[in-house]
Amino acid sequence: MSATLHPQGRFALNDPVDFLIVGCGASGGVLARELSRSGFRVVVLEQGPWKSAKDFGHNEYLNWSNSELINDWRKQPNTFRKTPQDKANKQPAIMYGRLVGGGPVHFTANYWRFHEIDFIEASKKGTIPGTGFADWPITYADLEPYYTKAEWDLGISGQAGVSPFDPPHSKPYPLPPMPVKPDGVLFEKAARKLGYHPFPAPVAVISKAYNGRMACQHCGWCEGFGCEHGAKSSPLPSMIPQAVATGRCEIRPHSYVRKIELDEKGRATAAIYFDQNKVEKRQRAKAIILAANGAETPRLLLMSKSNRFPNGLANSSGLVGKYLMFNTDPMCGGLFEHELNGYKSIEVTRILQDFYEVDPKLGFYGGGGISARFQNFPISFALGGLPPSIPQWGSEYKKALAKYFTRSMALMGHGTSLPMENNSITLDETVKDAWGLPAICVTYKDHPDDLKFATFLQDRSMEILEAAGAQDRWKYPVGETVFGVHLLGTCRMGHDPKSSVVNADHRSHDVPNLFLCDGSSFVTSGRGQPTAHIQGLAFRAADRITALAKENKI
Amino acid sequence: MESTRRTFLLRSSGALGVLLFDLLTPELLAQAHRHAANSTATGSQTFRFLTPQEAADFDAFAAQVIPTDETPGAHEAGAVYFADYVLSAINPEQQQDFRNALAMLRMAASEAQPGVSSFAALPVERQIAAMKAMEKPPAADSANASNSIAAETGVGAKDAQAFGMLRMVALMGTFCDPSLHGNRLKIGWKLIGFDDQAYWAPPFGYYDANAEEKA
């Protein structure tokens, strides 16, 4: 959809709008809608295009191999190293949604709230040497109303309270759970046999028509694809139309920000960006919110050096870009006698969270859940969906393809990553992107406990597959993480300016009219499904920023 | 006329935003989806990027990845036409890497049978031997084999990389959306039992039909 089709507000570059938001994804889309509805004039600068439901299809090659919805490593290369002492190699290291609507346009749609323990885990369990394990400056009670608001305003399907591990919900989900799939049936019965408590997965897909949007048609093309029905509850069909309908919000796609400018008083005044034609522009604003994701937000701060901030904007703590967390995702598979046809309908319909916390006697920190899921569309299945023990080409391979595609399922663990100061986003000045800007360098090495817990989750998953009657079971190796999709923790939230980058209102400690709100705000990683938390934080941030603005405190 | 009205509805819904989606039925969407898939399903018979020799070599390679037996394989699916199409029309920047991989395939062929410089010209058993030699050369089994970064160095690793690229393209060409000139007649999808329908309704498989009895 061309942006010109929208009856949206238009603002001149030299017009200091109330809020300039960088990034129109999971959090930026929410902030744009909330702030424009509150009466503020908002400009949103988004790197990627502004697509719509009619642009989305089922072309696996174009979506994945051609970076239709995500960052394109050919234009925006990454480098990677395990430790700061290593030489960084040029290779894809992160992935994020690069379009209006952001990652939730293409994500699997799992929508898990944090639990009470996530916010206070360090004080409950003690710090962990060598890590930045810490409490959040807010509690579950602070955020609960905003989880609820996100669920109702975006459209989440699920069944609250059915799991004994579920945190308190002030309201049920607005939509009933999605129909259980064959893998969910098998998973549920097997998990119950083992004494666990499986329950319907909360998902950002509407099970019934909702707010003028069509219900899910179970086409199955969720993970990696935009929804041509508008049934996936990303900001694209939910927040964005309502934001532009105010007439006070202008969304500018293909706008790639390279620097945030300050005035002599140390206040943010403008963003310098490249437009679609790589022509440099400068948009003025009274306040700026970075919602560009946990990699691009710290990158932009690090690129916005000045005499006042020689190590990067808002980086007096030296922590911008540090404490990167990816989550772990151990996976195994099972083959069954009859057809599961996992490619039909959404990826996940049943999960369990019995391992949200584990017995300290195990000797390692960790927590998470397990989902039963469809994992591979035809191309990706052929490339790597079979058990590793099966030949990967030839006659036996062909027979296995025919046997396994409709009759296998995956169990995936979703686990914690500890915050480690060495794990980081930095600038690699030796590698430039297509705009001449320094590439993102990812430094990442899992904490040993993260890998131990991932292995623990995988072992429990294998037991569930056995209890489900799988004819064949297999593991994919649990190894060190070299690629991240969940981009968390790189501008962490906290009360102390020396040990955090933003405060509990997402305001940077160093620049009073600069806010950071996306995965970068995370203090701990949660249990592997960050989107609900990112959007709960965004709704809360919008409330806090609105209050501050109306009290003239920005 | 009905078809025109449905196509119009679909286009209109896109132009005007998501609010019109509640006017669409699953049947309308399914018809539009079928139309879109079929309208571009016919592939080219000539090559725009590949030379005849390269096309023959890659076609023979793909035919060993997904062989033809009692059911069609990568050859019948037209994987080679997918390769030619995407490398000429969508990802031309990858042409040289693909061409280099084919050159390494020819080298493997000449090592499998001295004097032969065409993979396609090898007898089947020599083709398979050449592919096995490329897939797992001695250097790829080094101590660094588990480290994908370190494995990028060394002649053996380059063989494996070339093999991996050719295998990947063969599989993409067999299982891709038919609009990309591969997966002709949906041969790949039929092989694995994938049905590209635009919408489904429960039950989706065996275990959710009368779940109480069968799970």
Image (cartoon, helix red, strand yellow):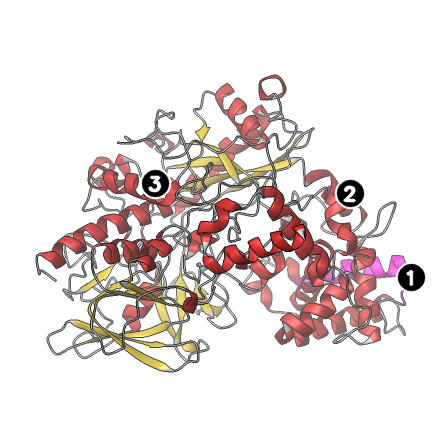
Work out how far the residue at label 3 is from the one at label 2, CA to CA, in angstroms: 44 Å
Residue A348 position in % (x across, y down): 51, 38
Is the residue marked by circle 1 packed among few (<14), some (14-19), or many (20+) residues within 10 Å? few
Which residue is under mark 1? B123
Location of the C terminus of chain B by quadrant is top right
In the rendered structure, which amino acid carries the disc numbered 1?
Answer: Pro
Residue A3 position in % (x across, y down): 42, 67
Q: Is residue A479 visible?
A: no
Work out how far the residue at label 1 is from the one at label 2, CA to CA, in angstroms: 23 Å
Chain ID at mark 1? B
Residue A37 position in % (x across, y down): 25, 54
Which residue is under mark 3? A151
Where are the magenta residues, as a range? B121-139
Frontmost of labels 1 and 2 is 2
Q: Which is nearer the eye, B11 or A359? A: B11
Frontmost of labels 1 and 3 is 3
Q: Report whether A537 appears left or right of A232.
A: left
Which residue is under mark 2? A399
